[in-house]
Amino acid sequence: MATNSTSQENSSDYFSTETHTNKNYGFQIMFAMVGSLSLVLSFIAITVLRRTKRIPKSAKFLATLLLVLDCWFISLTSLNAFNGNPFVNSTISVFGTLAGMLAYTTIAVMAVERVYALHSPMKYIRKCSLATVRMVSCVVLGGVATVYLTLRYGVCFWQVGSMSLVFGTKDICSYINTFYLIVLASVVIVSVGSYIRIFIIVKQTVKKVKPSNQRPVSNVFKEIKEFTQTSIVLVYLIAVLVTYVVFSILIIIGQVNKIEQTTVSSVGSLLFMCNSLTDSLLYILWFKECQLELLKMLSFLGHSIQRKTETMKMKVYDIVPFTPPTKVEHPCIIHV
């Protein structure tokens, strides 16, 4: 059990939550600002989401799970920017990376759930209860977490043979990055494959309804937008893909221009935190019922918010206001 000295300790770890605390106060201020904003918005999104009544319970559970994992990731990433202890730094980095992996895995679970709901809607209603969704999510996320922690601590200790190095050095086992990339690639493949299947299902459904009408691709996407849960998961997936494309470009620029890994890693962590921020914003802005619950929470601010709340309530619940008739016919009194 020989120690892989310099090669592993200096291995690149672009995809971790490590910020390599280097007393860069500019990055620390940025982490504090972005982290605080992301946490506040995540807590608001979780609160309004749990108060809604029309969003299906299974979709609400998965969305809440994603937002909780985002909070976990944001908290640990922000904390790591201000930490200098190697042991604490390594531990925070490991569990922050785990939170990021589990959040992206949750998006893949949400995509598969959407395929099942559209492919077999009647079977989905009968079998896919909240308990089933919880059990499947726990099995999938628990499996990813178990494999990751076993590789990071169990296999790494067997390879290195030093407890202090395993728990006190972040980059001690470079193959952990490979596992992270495998999980990411699996999430992308499963999610993209799921939405290709959703596109095919919707297109076939449209042809059955209107066989003579050859609808273009753009119109098929318009039909998909009618399924709000399906479309918001698609937006999540697009946000993840854009984030990783931008970060990949950042890595290439860093290598070409010989930018320090600490700077690239810090910028990447901020980028992923902004990605988590969009998760919470989407649920607040995407669903009118979430907007209604947010207005209810803010109704103490004044009558204008209360009026907006009543207007939004009518839109959400399709309430038609009563309009009295313009002319009221009085009954004729006949004197006998």
Image: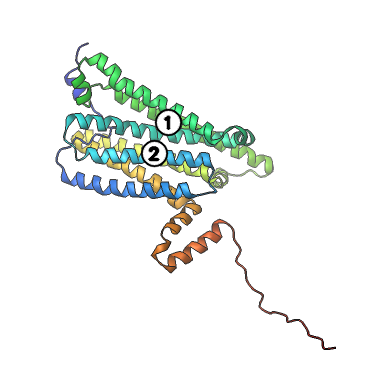
Q: Position of residue 285 (x, y in %)?
A: 44, 52
Q: How is the image coloured?
A: rainbow
Q: Position of residue 4 (x, y in %)?
A: 20, 16
Q: Is residue 299 left or right of residue 122?
A: left
- Identify which amino acid the numbered label 2 is placed on: Val
Q: Is residue 29 left or right of residue 245?
A: left
Helix, strand or loop status at disc 2: helix
Q: CA distance from mark 1 to mark 2?
A: 10 Å
Q: Residue at x 20, y 38 (%)?
A: 263
Q: Position of residue 122 (x, y in %)?
A: 64, 36
Could you tell me if residue 200 is visible in this image?
Answer: no
Q: Image quarter for residue 183?
A: top left
Write down the residue under mark 1: 187
- Judge whether 58 appears above or below 185 on screen: below
**Nearest the eye: 268 or 16:** 16
Instruction: Determine which of the numbered discs, if any, sits on residue 27 in the image.
Output: none
- Identify which amino acid the numbered label 1 is placed on: Val
Q: Residue at x 36, y 42 (%)?
A: 276
> Mark 1 touching mark 2, by CB under 8 A?
yes
The 10 Å Cα crowd at callout 1, few under 14, some 14 to 19, many 20 or more, is many
On the rendered image, what quadrant is the N terminus found in? top left
Helix, strand or loop status at disc 1: helix
Write down the residue under mark 2: 240
Q: Image quarter for residue 159?
A: top left
Q: Image quarter for residue 215?
A: top right
Q: Is residue 198 left or right of residue 103?
A: right
Q: Residue at x 28, y 21 (%)?
A: 153
Extreme-right residue of the structure = 336
On the rendered image, what quadrant is the C terminus found in? bottom right
Extreme-left residue of the structure = 23
